[in-house]
Image (cartoon, grey):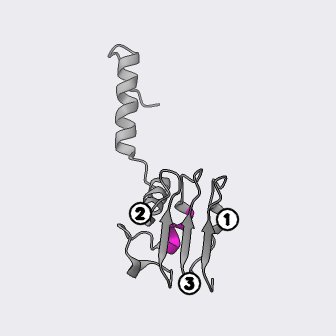
Amino acid sequence: MGGTIDLNFNPALTSLDGLAGITSVGGDLVVQGHAALNNCAALAPILGFPVTPYSPAADSVAGTVTMAFNGVGANSPDDCLNAYARQFAPVPTTQVWAMLLLMLLIASNGAVYLRRH
């Protein structure tokens, strides 16, 4: 997108999901003053995901990135990158199966019989 994205002081703004399709910014990216905004994961692709911590050399913003005075979790490019990474983090299957087996053992007082059908 050519030009600057300048989002300022909308205390009711809770989502940036409408910006998820933007692949680059030709000017500055400014997101500030949104007290109800607690997640900025939608910006991660233009901020250089999967490169973390944030590096201006890896982003797709021609100008500067300014993020401030938003809700907790949306005040820096690193907040956006981390939120995006958490959304797509792989499920630790080995740990999940171990927990399920442990719960099964506890629920059955240790008498678990595995049978193949």
Report the amino acid beneath label 3: Gly
- Callout 1 environment at 10 Å: few (<14), some (14 to 19), or many (20+)? few
Of the numbered discs 2 and 3, the one sitting upstream in the chain is: 3
Q: Is the Cβ of the residue at disc 2 closer than 8 Å to that at disc 3?
A: no
Which is the main secondary structure of the residues drawn in magenta?
A: helix
Q: Earlier in the sequence, mark 1 or mark 3?
A: 1
Q: Nearer the viewer, residue 85 or 8?
A: 8
Q: How far across and down, in percent of the image, does residue 35 sit?
A: 57, 52
Location of mark 1 (residue) = 18
Q: Quadrant of the N terminus?
A: bottom right
- Three-letter code for the amino acid on which mark 1 is drawn: Gly
Any part of residue 113 in sight: no
Q: What residue is pinned by disc 3?
A: 27
* Residue at image location 50% in from the left, 83% down from the top: 63
Magenta segment range? 42-46
Which residue does the image show at 59% across and 57% down from the upper left? Answer: 34
Q: Is residue 43 magenta?
A: yes
Res. 50 visible in picture = yes
In the picture of the structure, the residue carrying the numbered disc 2 is: 78
Q: Secondary structure at mark 1?
A: helix
Q: Nearer the viewer, residue 9 or 52?
A: 9
Contact (CB < 8 A) between labels 2 and 1?
A: no
